[in-house]
Image (tube, rainbow, N blue to C red):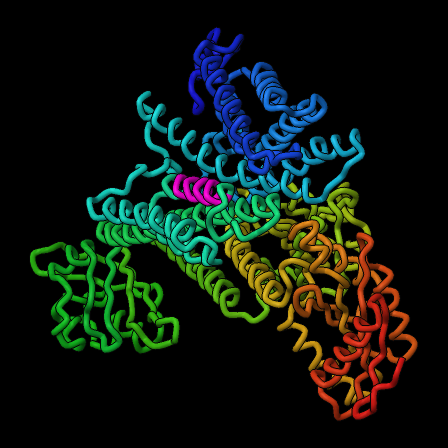
Amino acid sequence: MPHGPGLKRRGAAADGSTVSQDRPSAAALVRSGAFALAHLAAVLLGRLTVEEGASLSLVWPAGGVAAVWFAAQRRAGTRGPDLAALALTTGGANLVTGAEPVLAACSAAAGLLQVLVLHALLARWCPSLWGAGGEEPLRRPRQLGALVLAAVSATAAGAALGPGAVGVLEGTWSLVTLGVWVTRGTVSVVVLGTVGLLLGARLAQHRRRRAGAPARADDLPPLLPPGRWARVELALAVVATAAGYVLVFTVLDGLPIAFPLLALTVWVALRAGTTVVALHGLAAAVTAVAFTLHGEGPFAAVADHPARALVVQLFGGLVAVLGTLLALGRDERDDLLRAVRAVAREAERRERLTQTVLDTVDVGIVVADPQGRLVLLNDAARGWHGLDARAALDPGEHAQAYGLLAPDGRPLDADEVPLRRALAEGAVDGVPMLIRAQGRADRSVVCTGRTMAAADGSPLGAVVAMHDVTQALAREGELRTAHDRLTEHIEHAEVLARASRSLATSDDPRGAICRAVCELTGAEGAYLLQPDEHGVLVSTALVGLDDVPVRLDPSSDVSLALVAYGSARPLFVADVRSHPENSDALRRAFDIASGAWQPLVLPGDRVVGVIGALWHRPVAGLPAHVPAMLETLAAEAAHVVERADLLSRLERAAQRDPLTGLANRRRWDEVAAQETARAARSGAPLTFALVDLDRFKAYNDGLGHLAGDALLRDFAVAAEACLRREDVLARWGGEEFALALPGCAGADAVAVADRVRAAVPHGQTCTVGLATWWPGETAAEALARADAALYRGKQAGRDATVVADPPGAVPALR
């Protein structure tokens, strides 16, 4: 077990799995006791930061200790004793240090709720992470993000039960108290929790190694970097960090220059291991908090003690999270590079394998350059001719030098040599030839070859495959069958290669997929279905069929396409009309008699779509070669579809604001230009608006950046609900939004703006400046008038809709 021998086992199954476990082991209880003492010390340390006349600790390291405690003991079977010990140490330490009984009880209950919520969220979001139910160490930025989000959620829940309950019972309520509670708890959990998760996973890894378990791909590297100079650099970074913090917090006391310390964090993050970086962040955070609470350093200038503690803890948390995030990003990049190198090694191995195959097959392979000079003969060809490739030999002398004869024993002319013909004609197929080399038995071969070209179409030469048919000449019928099969295989390969090229080069890859399916199967029509964001299959391409949109809901519809998609297996139905899974609506829409459905499956059995090949006339079955070719095409098409979808998502992401999902400033500039051009052509009215959330900075400062972000997101959703499909709402910057209302002016535009103002959530308001676009005016000029109107609305008291004056007009008094 990764967390140590926490439980005593009664027995194990033959495969090594645990059969049953009973009471906690003595070692587990000892660890629980040690964590309880550490938590008690952390609570007492936090209580030392209680201001005179107040009840709230400004710093709370106990939150991080509790997070590590329950992560390390997750599988130890001590959950009940641990919860009891956590409540006793929290409540008891509060009582001993002078806290009121109600405060002590609420603090203990809040601590219990906080640690339970934290680990429940981690188990849900990162089930494979050590301390959350799995064995994987903290190695991804996404995992750190989950830890931060879980910490914020857990401390917010604790704040509701701690300060919230005290406020209800005592009749007092303070947003500052809630802010300090959430900040101190979040920073403590993130900083100490990151260190605990990394050290715990490292200890579990050490135990596995001692038990003889093999190394795993996700194992953490050694704590200290290898190499003398790397360790010297780390020591210098630690010394520089210590000197930097002493300088900033003592020598330069009072100057607001804490930001250069971030450079030290970046240095360590880019050069040291993730565990060392996390420890460095912890030390930096503790140092900054200790100096600040002692009244020294740049943050001591904040007069309000709770605000001072909140700011310095935010700084410490930022330093620790920034360093760890950079280190994790570097680790993720290194993992990707290792994967790329592995792919390169695999490509090299395959190249060697290809050469080995060429040298071991009993087919003679001959390769020439575009001028016909020999470049390569594999082992079989060298053995048959008794010679290797002689690049200096004139192509006209190949027949004589290599003993090339016609099947009747006549010497071949230079232009009859299969390789020469392949260069001249583009391809040769089934050309019989006799090889008569000195000192060797005659060998009859059938030659097949073709020219080779680079991706840009430039010629690379030609290749000829010589198949030994000496022993088969007596069985002419069998040879003819083999030849027919070879020809058919080459034709099929050509069809598949042509289809593959069309997928790779087409501007419409989905349509190319459908056309390739029709060519491969002989179907009269084809469609491609892909799941949308709700999991409903919708048509993304139709070829040879009526343009009827297809929409299939797996939860309610019945269709043969859904059968193939759900099972990830191909399906052919000769009589669609009588099949119980047939969709009558689709059959009638496309007049389907027979059909074949092939799912698009990516590695890992992930289905990204399904292709339907349809016939209006009955088809008894597919030719024997078609299913394999269709499966090969579908595998390539799955990657093509995924790549096309990824490009589409990237293009959309480049035009969207990441917080609200609205159009960003770049997209707004395009829309504004398009709408003014359209209005100029059509003469239709066009109105621009600028919307600004009133007193957003005060809201953001009072409730925190997370609440501010939530207000922006919720307003975006509410405002879009007030608009038409053709209206465009974009995030202009900060709390300001831009709105385009094509075909709308005057009272109609004011009505829309008023609806938007009424939709502002969370009890907040906004001010709107409207400007109707005039012919000859640019979008920027119209927006400038809207901005002026918005400014007048702000000056007049906010929460208003103000219409801009026409261009050149003197602003009217309102």
Q: Quadrant of residue 43?
A: top right
The structure residue drawn at horizontal position 48% and vertical position 55%, both measured from the top left corner, is: 254
Horizontally, residue 230 falls left or right of residue 126, namely left
Q: Position of residue 756 (x, y in %)?
A: 84, 64
The structure residue drawn at horizontal position 63% and vertical position 45%, both measured from the top left corner, is: 571
Judging depth in this view, the residue of 790 and 567 nearest the camera is 790
Q: Position of residue 209 (x, y in %)?
A: 32, 26
Judging depth in this view, the residue of 292 and 107 nearest the camera is 292
Horizontally, residue 213 falls left or right of residue 3, namely left
Q: Is residue 285 magenta?
A: yes
Q: Residue furthest front?
A: 52
Is 7 rendered above or below residue 267?
Answer: above
Judging depth in this view, the residue of 713 and 172 nearest the camera is 172
Whether residue 367 is visible to the viewer of this picture, yes or no, is: yes
Q: Residue furthest left?
A: 439
Is 640 rendered above or below residue 326?
Answer: below
Whether residue 594 is visible to the viewer of this picture, yes or no, is: no
Q: Residue furthest right?
A: 747
Is 115 rendered above or below residue 370?
Answer: above
Horizontally, residue 191 falls left or right of residue 349, namely right
Which quadrant of the figure contains the N terminus? Answer: top left
Q: Is residue 421 magenta?
A: no
Q: Position of residue 268 (x, y in %)?
A: 35, 49
Identify the main secondary structure in magenta: helix
Q: Position of residue 654 (x, y in %)?
A: 59, 66
The structure residue drawn at horizontal position 22% and vertical position 65%, both measured from the top left corner, is: 408
The structure residue drawn at horizontal position 36% and vertical position 34%, both measured from the top left corner, is: 216
Question: Magenta stretch?
Answer: 279-292
Which quadrant of the figure contains the C terminus? Answer: bottom right
